[in-house]
Image (tube, rainbow, N blue to C red):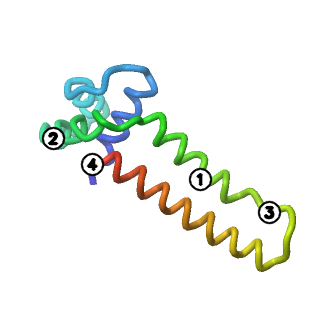
Amino acid sequence: MGLEYIYAALLLHEAKKDIDEASVSKIIESVGLTADKAMIKSTVENLKEVNIEEVLSSAVAAPVAATVAPVAGGEEKKEEKKEENTEKKAEAAATGLSSLFG
């Protein structure tokens, strides 16, 4: 699927290192995988325009928002809000993923 390239990029981001082809390749190979140069190049190119910090914070915020129960209102309102939160969470995840993969 290629998630190992995203994981490598996230590790580099967390370490505050440049996300470039050589660094991603080095991480992939360090865990015993064969680095696919085309996948690495594609991943690095697609992530150039992505604000990784923003994507990560929106991904973290969505589940938190879904767990907060409304204080007032009946059971119907709670169900509506749960549905809205689930839809918003799905939209946020889709937006985050599409921005990661261009």
> In the rendered structure, which disc, 2 or 4, sits on the residue that comes first in sequence?
2
The answer to whether 51 is drawn above or below residue 80 in the figure is: above
Distance from Cα at disc 2 to Cα at disc 4:
19 Å
Which element carries disc 1, helix, strand or loop?
A: helix
Distance from Cα at disc 4 to Cα at disc 1:
21 Å
The answer to whether 11 is drawn above or below residue 99 in the figure is: above
Distance from Cα at disc 1 to Cα at disc 3:
15 Å
Q: Alpha-carbon neighbours of circle 1 within 10 Å: few (<14), some, or many (≥20)? A: some
Tell me, for residue 36, which label it has, or none: 2
> In the rendered structure, which disc, 4 or 3, sits on the residue that comes first in sequence?
3
Q: In front: mark 1 or mark 2?
A: 1
In this view, the residue in front, 62 or 4, is 62
Residue hosting label 4: 102
- Percent position of residue 24, x then y: 26, 30
Circles 4 and 3: CB atoms closer than 8 Å:
no
Residue that appears at 41% across and 54% down: 95
> In the rendered structure, which disc, 2 or 3, sits on the residue that comes first in sequence?
2
> In the rendered structure, which disc, 4 or 1, sits on the residue that comes first in sequence?
1
The answer to whether 63 is drawn above or below residue 19 in the figure is: below
Side of 57 relative to 64 (left or right): left
> In the rendered structure, which disc, 1 or 3, sits on the residue that comes first in sequence?
1
The kind of residue on which mark 1 rests is Ala
- Percent position of residue 25, x then y: 22, 30
Residue that appears at 75% across and 57% down: 68
The kind of residue on which mark 2 rests is Asp
> In the rendered structure, which disc, 1 or 2, sits on the residue that comes first in sequence?
2
- Percent position of residue 32, x then y: 26, 35
The kind of residue on which mark 3 rests is Pro
Residue hosting label 3: 70
